[in-house]
Image (spheres, grey):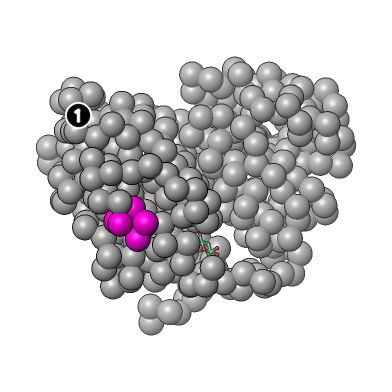
Amino acid sequence: ALMDKGNYKHFMAKEIHEQPEVLGHTLSQYVDYTQNKANVAGSEQLRFKDLSRLVITACGTAYLAGLVGKYWFEKYARLPVDIDIASEFRYRETPLSSADSALFISQSGETADTLASLRYCKSQGASIGAIVNVPESTIARESDVIFPTIAGPEVGVASTKAFTCQLAVLAALALQAGRERGTLTFEEEAKLVSELTELPTLTLKALSNEVEIQKLSQQLSKATNALYLGRNTSFPIALEGALKLKELSYIHAEGYAAGELKHGPIALIDENIPVVVIAPFDAIYEKTVSNMQEVAARGGRIILITDERGAAQCGTSPETVVVLPEMSDIVAPIVYALPVQMIAYHTAVFMGTDVDQPRNLAKSVTVE
Ligand code: G6P
């Protein structure tokens, strides 16, 4: 029954819709709801208090989860993070010692490059932690401490629920690190934890935009190129949106930091290129709006994903606005991942591609 698509056409659709539930399961392992504290068993293995930096390594979508994690560790725990994709990390001879800790993120726990990076860090004496969805995996076995995502088996080749659960674990770990390093007050931690507990409700609301997303995806499926833009923690979500779209629909897509637009991709903007802008109404919303106006001035067709306040202040440049509920900064990248997944899913369905098993891709890349 676990490997059943239920009433869904594809495993991917089922897995997207499971997110409110599995995020709840995952969070309940990592936060103490009665005291509103992060509660990550085994975190002492990573010695957050004494670390001068944390190394994070992963591939694909798991790497993009790590990229969001970097913003959180640096903001909430004042802990510098070095993050790299595993195929680069493993060969670049990073200096490491027994004073370092390294964190690996992998749904399968079997990705060859991630495993090789883990073994390199181990050989240098670093402490090893892993966020995995398969607790019996090789990466899990070879780590000093594991932080399992409770996403359940993920069948669709393109990662969805494992990604958002990786983010939930990373958020809890960053708050745990903040407490251990003395960079978060008791009150700040309690507020952030209570915001995280909203995730099941918020992701459920995000799913309610599906019909609208289906409509805009029909338009998107006519494009040959697409651009995704975001700032701060929305930047990795823009990268994830572009990755998902190209993997599933074979439409060429690029994710860019919105502020980097004028250093290249703006040259591509014309009326044929849809630009998906991920912009919750946060401290830098205005900056993204001005990037959006630059796109609109060149005829680019903007799909804005924002919240009610953002929608009220976005001006006339977007062609389509997907409106999510208002939410705090810490949950936004997790919740905004859902519309981005649904866009890729529905575009691929319109294109008639093999959604659960895109050409040339594998669920778990166990060879280099
Ligand atoms: C493949 C999958 C991706 C996944 C990546 C890393 O490319 O198609 O969805 O993000 O591998 O896999 P891992 O199991 O290490 O998370």
Residues rendered magenta in the picture: 118-123
Give me the residue at 19% from left, 29% from top: 181
* 315 in relation to 145, above or below: above
* 365 in relation to 264, above or below: below
Residue 78 position within the rendered picture, expressed as x and y whole percent measured from the top left: 31, 26
- Label 1: element kind: helix
Residue 309 position within the rendered picture, expressed as x and y whole percent measured from the top left: 53, 23
Quarter-wise, where is residue 305 in the image? top right
Give me the residue at 52% from left, 56% from top: 87
Residue 264 position within the rendered picture, expressed as x and y whole percent measured from the top left: 76, 31
Quarter-wise, where is residue 238 in the image? top right
Where the C terminus falls, by quadrant? bottom right
Give me the residue at 68% from left, 19% from top: 290
Give me the residue at 61% from left, 19% from top: 287
Q: Is residue 307 at least partly visible in the picture?
A: no
Q: Within the magenta stretch, is there residue 121? A: yes
Spot the residue most to the bottom: 1
Quarter-wise, where is residue 95 in the image? top left
Q: Within the magenta stretch, is there residue 134? A: no
Circle 1 crowding by C-alpha within 10 Å: few under 14, some 14–19, many from 20: some
**Side (left or right) of 342 relative to 177:** right
Pointer 1: what residue?
A: 181
Where the N terminus falls, by quadrant? bottom left
* 229 in relation to 1, above or below: above
Q: What amino acid is at disc 1?
A: Arg
Residue 28 position within the rendered picture, expressed as x and y whole percent measured from the top left: 22, 52
